[in-house]
Image: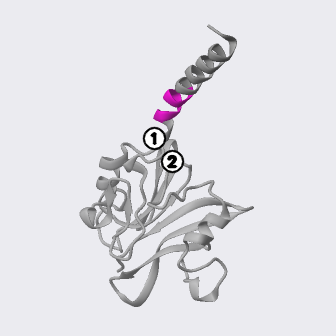
Amino acid sequence: MPPARALTATLATSLLAALATAAPAAAGTSDPRYRVPVTAATPATIGEFVESESSGDAGVGLRAAFGAPTSTVRRSSQCFVRWSRIGLWVELTNYGQSRHPCTHGYFQRARLLGSRWYTPRGLRVGSSTAAARSQAVCGAGRPSCRRPGYALGYVLGFHRIDCARGLFPNVIAAVARGRVTALWVYTHGCE
């Protein structure tokens, strides 16, 4: 075989091998188990967990979606549940009811860490601040974007909540040092 054809064949083989090994990684980047929808009509949704389907039993719904948590810490009517393997931290509450907030609580908010979590437009932890800014409906630091109890960052979507007028953030991209550091997801419910 002439040297030029041999080089072309070697390059083609190398390219095919590279694509074959890259394909599983690319497929994993859009795994629906780690998708975070961002629309006004969507209740808090994290992968396979949908807040409205688990109302009052969010701990059960989260375990069904993500398995056993790494840690669970109860503080009175609040419960903080963590899945360190997948970068998920969730706050639940029982709103002062007698039910156990860690299993039969109501979803309040979640912090998602790790690049596996992504929005429908591909924003994820590690994306640039510019990417978050371009997808934001309201920018970080603008007074109109701030709500007490919500993380600072780029608001990616708003929704209505059950007990107050106006729109409230449903997903926020927190940023630091030019990168998205976390995605925050918030409840549509309230006491």
**Is residue 41 one of those drawn in magenta?**
no
The residue furthest front is 2
In reply to whether residue 19 is colored magenta, the answer given is yes
Q: CA distance from mark 2 to mark 1?
A: 8 Å
Query: What secondary structure is the stretch in magenta mostly built from?
Result: helix
Instruction: Name which residue lies at 59% across and 71% down.
Output: 134
Front one among 119 and 113: 119
Start-end of magenta stretch: 18-24
The crowd level at tag 2 (other Cα within 10 Å; few <14, some 14-19, many 20+) is some
| Label of residue 116 in the image | 2
- What residue is at 38 percent from the left and 89 percent from the top? 164
Question: What secondary structure is found at the residue carrying circle 1?
Answer: helix
Q: What residue occupies the far bottom of the structure in this picture?
A: 165
Residue 137 placement (x, y as % from top left): 53, 78
Q: Which mark is residue 28?
A: 1
Few, some or many residues within 10 Å of mark 1 (<14, 14–19, 20+): few
Q: Are marks 2 and 1 in contact (CB under 8 Å)?
A: yes
Q: Hey, what amino acid is under mark 1? A: Gly
Of circles 2 and 1, which is in front? 1
Would you place residue 28 above or below residue 162 in this image?
above
Residue drawn at x 40%, y 68% is 77
* Residue 109, quarter of picture: bottom left
**Residue 92 horizontal/vertical position (percent):** 40, 64
Q: Secondary structure at mark 2?
A: loop
Look at the picture and state if 157 lies above or below 117. below
Find residue 127 and report its horizontal and vertical position in percent: 62, 57
Residue extending farthest to the top is 1
Kindly identify the amino acid type of the residue bearing the numbered disc 2. Arg
On the image, which quarter does residue 183 sit in?
bottom right
Quarter of the figure that contains the N terminus: top right
